[in-house]
Image: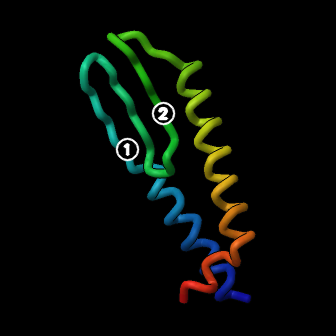
């Protein structure tokens, strides 16, 4: 029981550490900030922030990740790889 709680605590700590990682790219008047959990946090084009585009990109990424997870589950998950 304690091992499971310890594993959950470690997983939460890892999740928070990954989310805290930030990558920022600025090229050709476009600036994008992405967190380690693959979420767009900020996007601007020629200095103008675009929150609607950020929300739309994040929704698309989430749907893509869900589709990939379903496909992996349908194909037997990761168990067959090990």
Quadrant of res 31: top left
Q: Position of residue 26 (x, y in %)?
A: 27, 27
The residue lying at 28 percent from left, 16 percent from top is: 29
Label placed on residue 22: 1
Q: Residues within 10 Å of mark 2 (few under 14, many from 20)?
A: some
On screen, 9 above or below 67? below
Q: Position of residue 51 (x, y in %)?
A: 54, 19
On screen, 51 above or below 20? above
Q: Is residue 53 left or right of residue 32?
A: right
Image quarter of the C terminus: bottom right
Q: Earlier in the sequence, mark 2 or mark 1?
A: 1
Quadrant of res 2: bottom right
The residue lying at 64 percent from left, 57 percent from top is: 68
Q: Position of residue 34 (x, y in %)?
A: 42, 39
Q: Is residue 57 left or right of residue 72?
A: left
Label placed on residue 41: 2
Q: Is residue 63 left or right of residue 14?
A: right
The residue lying at 50 percent from left, 65 percent from top is: 14
Q: Residues within 10 Å of mark 1 (few under 14, many from 20)?
A: some
Q: How many marks?
A: 2
Q: Is residue 36 left or right of residue 55?
A: left
> Farthest residue toward the front?
75
Image quarter of the N terminus: bottom right
Disc 1 on helix, strand or loop? strand
In front of the other: 7 or 67: 67
In front of the other: 21 or 67: 67
Label 2 close to label 1 by CB (< 8 Å): yes
Disc 2 on helix, strand or loop? strand
């Amino acid at each position: 029981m304690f091992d499971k709680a310890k594993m959950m605590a470690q997983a939460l700590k890892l999740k928070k550490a990954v989310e805290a990682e930030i990558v920022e790219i600025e090229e050709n008047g476009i600036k994008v900030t992405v967190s380690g959990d693959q979420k767009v946090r900020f996007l601007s084009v020629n200095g103008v922030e675009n929150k609607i585009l950020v929300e739309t990109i994040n929704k698309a990424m989430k749907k893509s990740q869900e589709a990939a997870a379903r496909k992996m589950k349908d194909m037997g998950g990761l168990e067959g790889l090990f």
